[in-house]
């Protein structure tokens, strides 16, 4: 019987993000294209027989009770009545508050890993439903494929993408998602389109204007990266990215940026590294 697992939790980019409306409950309706990249956190899971669930290391500004990994584990345990527990060690690499989906990815990896460690055999659709209780971005990581998303981000259709490369920059600001989505100047009237016509659309991030207004540093990073390609913010920020055809072009662009602009070169993934761990 397996008693330990070490698993990646990859970051995502929003290759575009259009806000098409707002529901009565406050959630925003959107269209976006999720892209996994090989920048990832790493999670270590150790089986416990006593049913206890704990995070074994400190994460700055994230109390254990609020940690999405711990919440995901407790949700799965409650859903299945599983008597087992787990110790979770989380190695954070993905910046928090950057729009790269790190917390959501950690939660999804926890659901996938514990489904295996606890030998539960919960199907992908149900894990996605559980993930939605934790956050709107969690289901796509359980879905495990690059995806065109609608609704609040949970209505997913697989969308094949080439293995492009990206420069991803980390502006030194933390952007609160709720602050951006509730801002009075945020437009919520982008016209919906179908996945079939995606390649013909003018794509943008509808949140970017508001974020750049509130956080000029994000605007500065976008301008610097825009010298080398179409630079855009991901999610609700603050991280920004540009796409390149190969590693050499991406690395050359990163090296030409000002030294204080922290960032990485990352490759797009065809699918989530744990995609095949979950049965349909």
Image (cartoon, rainbow, N blue to C red):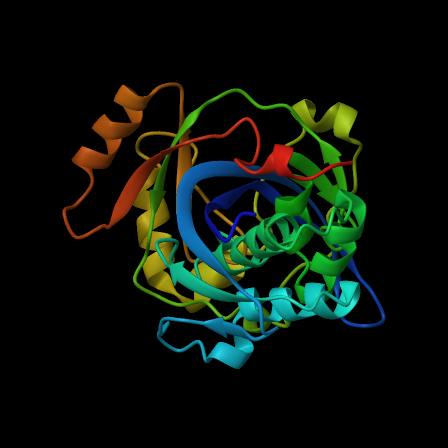
* Extreme residue in the front direction: 1
In the image, farthest residue toward the left: 259
Q: Is residue 152 above or below residue 53?
A: above
Residue 80: x and y, percent?
77, 63
Which residue is located at x 75 percent, y 55 percent? 152
Residue at the spot 22% in from the left edge and 27% down from the top edge: 252
Nearest the camera: 128 or 87?
Answer: 87
Q: Is residue 8 left or right of residue 251?
A: right
Image spot of residue 146 (x, y percent): 62, 34
Q: Is residue 185 visible?
A: no
* Number of marks in picture: 0
Of residues 208 and 271, the one nearer the viewer is 271
Q: Is residue 203 left or right of residue 258?
A: right
Q: Position of residue 149 (x, y in %)?
A: 72, 42
Location of residue 153 in the rendering, given as x and y in whole percent from the top left corner? 71, 51
Q: Is residue 199 above or below residue 95?
A: above
Which residue is painted at 85% across and 71% down in the image? 24
């Amino acid at each position: 019987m397996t008693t330990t697992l070490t698993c990646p939790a990859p970051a995502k980019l929003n290759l575009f993000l259009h806000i098409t409306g707002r529901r009565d409950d406050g959630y925003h309706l959107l269209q976006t294209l999720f892209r996994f990249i090989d920048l990832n956190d790493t999670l270590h899971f150790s089986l416990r027989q006593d049913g206890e669930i704990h995070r074994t290391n400190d994460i700055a500004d994230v109390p254990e009770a609020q940690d999405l990994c711990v919440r995901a584990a407790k949700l799965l345990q409650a859903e299945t009545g599983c008597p087992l527990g787990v110790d979770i060690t989380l190695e954070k690499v993905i910046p928090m508050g950057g729009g790269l989906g790190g917390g959501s990815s950690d939660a999804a990896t926890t659901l996938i890993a514990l489904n295996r460690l606890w030998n539960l055999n919960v199907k992908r659709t149900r894990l996605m439903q559980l993930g939605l209780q934790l956050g709107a971005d969690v289901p796509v990581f359980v879905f495990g494929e690059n995806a065109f998303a609608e609704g609040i981000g949970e209505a997913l259709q697989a969308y094949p993408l080439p293995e492009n490369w990206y420069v991803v920059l980390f502006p030194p600001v933390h952007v609160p998602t709720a602050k951006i989505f509730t801002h009075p100047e945020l437009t919520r009237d982008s016209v919906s389109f179908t996945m079939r016509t995606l390649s013909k659309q003018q794509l943008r991030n509808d949140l970017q204007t508001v974020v750049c207004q509130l956080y000029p540093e994000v605007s500065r990073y976008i301008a610097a990266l825009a010298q080398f390609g179409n630079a855009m913010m991901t999610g609700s920020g603050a991280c920004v990215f540009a796409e390149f055809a190969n590693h050499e072009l991406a690395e050359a662009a990163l090296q030409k940026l000002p030294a204080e602009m922290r960032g990485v070169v990352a490759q797009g993934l065809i699918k989530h590294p744990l995609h095949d761990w979950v049965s349909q």
